[in-house]
């Protein structure tokens, strides 16, 4: 579509054009009901079908065994930062956290409201430009759980695999910015959560995948009804009115992923897209990636130019060419190309070519 640009925004982020086109129709009249999706009851037959299909398609994509549940909750990942420890970190207990970026640090801050936090590893010493591995991770003696952030949008780093955790300790993950971007071994996790707005849909709905045993386990303290995983599960994510449109769009994204080969194929595409940009960075004397090579994200490519003046010139030139959203996070500066599942390969090719051309003219 000629009026569309290449949107490198870190979130809310690019969505598949097929999903947007279908949503445009369904906003007016979904399923021949004469009513748009925004107007349907969250307990009506139409939305029953929408949420049931979304759950089923998520299960198929992630190869979820029967012992896991799919929930659609409010509050974004930031609510999970406290809902998780409020439910499972007892007074006087300890949870282990891997600190690999700003969002990990926020999760740690919230968890400390409820119990002790042991920081098992941290890359704060190098401005979060790498993922600690192996002997750089040191767990406490008996953690209630281990928490990590799989992809770090600001620093442009990503865990290549799940961290190894002590036996009998369950793993919790904030996967907001790389959820369903590659195959995942769900049985390694007790709980995975992800705000939708980076890789799954619009802001305002949070995907939670969690082990049934955790849902039925009694929380370690009394919580308000809305913050109880069991209440949300027992009411099929509809204890109160959910984000109907957000769940609808997420369901359409699940169908798009399935139609495009599932997680193995989307993972291959994501690696190929990122390589187009990293190859330029590795051969450039003007641009330089900020993440350590063994920790690079396939979702958020962060880089700098030789000077801030050149960065400003490049961002301005990119916008003229229809490449928008490249300015880095305000806390670190530089540039960032967010290339989530729905971001087209041609956009990565266009950015790579502009970087080469800019270096010839400005280098």
Image: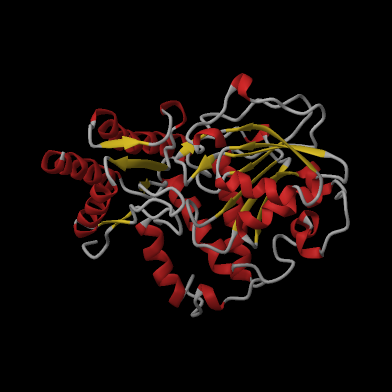
Compared to residue 266, the image places residue 36 above or below, namely below
In the displayed structure, does residue 157 sit left or right of residue 68? left
Measured from the top left, where is residue 54 in percent x and y? 57, 55
* Quarter of the N terminus within the rendering: bottom left
Residue 113 on image: x %, y %: 78, 52
Q: Is residue 180 above or below residue 228?
A: above
Where's residue 97, x and y in %? 68, 37
In the rendered image, the quadrant that contains the C terminus is top left
Q: Nearer the viewer, residue 123 or 52?
A: 123
The type of colouring in the image is: secondary structure
- Picture quadrant where residue 320 is located: bottom left
Work out whether residue 112 or residue 237 is closer to the camera in this orientation and state it. Answer: 112
Residue 187 lies left or right of residue 92; in this view the side is left
Point out residue 236 in the picture as x, y percentages from the top left corner.
72, 60
- Residue at coordinates 77% horizontally, 31% vertically from top-left? 169
**Which residue is pictured at 70% across the width and 45% down the height?**
210
Q: Work out whether residue 214 can be spotted.
A: yes
Q: Quadrant of residue 123?
A: top right
């Amino acid at each position: 579509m000629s009026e569309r640009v290449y949107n490198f925004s870190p979130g809310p982020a690019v969505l598949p054009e097929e999903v947007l086109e279908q949503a445009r129709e369904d906003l007016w009249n979904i399923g021949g009901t004469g009513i748009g999706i925004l107007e349907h009851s969250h307990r009506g037959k139409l939305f029953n079908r929408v949420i049931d299909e979304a759950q089923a398609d998520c299960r198929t994509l992630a190869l979820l065994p029967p012992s896991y549940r799919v929930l659609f909750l409010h509050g974004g990942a930031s609510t999970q930062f406290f809902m998780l420890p409020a439910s499972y970190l007892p007074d006087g207990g300890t949870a282990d956290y891997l600190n690999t970026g700003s969002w990990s640090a926020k999760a740690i801050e919230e968890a400390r409201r409820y119990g002790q936090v042991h920081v098992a590893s941290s890359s704060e010493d190098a401005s979060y430009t790498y993922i600690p591995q192996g002997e750089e991770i040191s767990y406490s003696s008996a953690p209630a759980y281990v928490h990590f952030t799989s992809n770090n949008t600001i620093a442009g780093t990503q865990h290549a695999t799940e961290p190894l955790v002590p036996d009998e300790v369950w793993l919790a993950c904030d996967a907001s910015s790389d959820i369903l971007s590659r195959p995942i071994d769900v049985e390694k996790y007790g709980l995975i959560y992800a705000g939708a707005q980076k890789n799954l849909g619009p802001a305002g709905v949070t995907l939670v995948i969690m082990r049934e045993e955790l849902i039925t386990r009694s929380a370690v303290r009394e919580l308000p009804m809305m913050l109880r995983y069991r209440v949300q599960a027992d009411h099929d994510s509809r204890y109160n009115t959910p984000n109907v449109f957000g769940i609808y769009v997420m369901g359409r994204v699940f169908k798009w992923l399935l139609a495009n080969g599932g997680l193995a194929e989307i993972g291959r595409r994501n690696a190929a897209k990122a390589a187009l940009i990293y190859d330029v960075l590795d051969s450039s004397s003007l641009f330089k990636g900020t993440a350590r090579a063994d920790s690079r994200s396939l979702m958020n490519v962060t880089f700098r130019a030789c000077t801030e003046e050149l960065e400003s010139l490049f961002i301005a030139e990119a916008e003229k060419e229809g490449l928008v959203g490249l300015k880095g996070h305000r806390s670190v500066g530089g540039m960032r190309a967010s290339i989530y599942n729905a971001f087209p390969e041609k956009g990565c090719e266009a950015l790579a070519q502009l970087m080469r051309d800019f270096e010839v003219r400005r280098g």
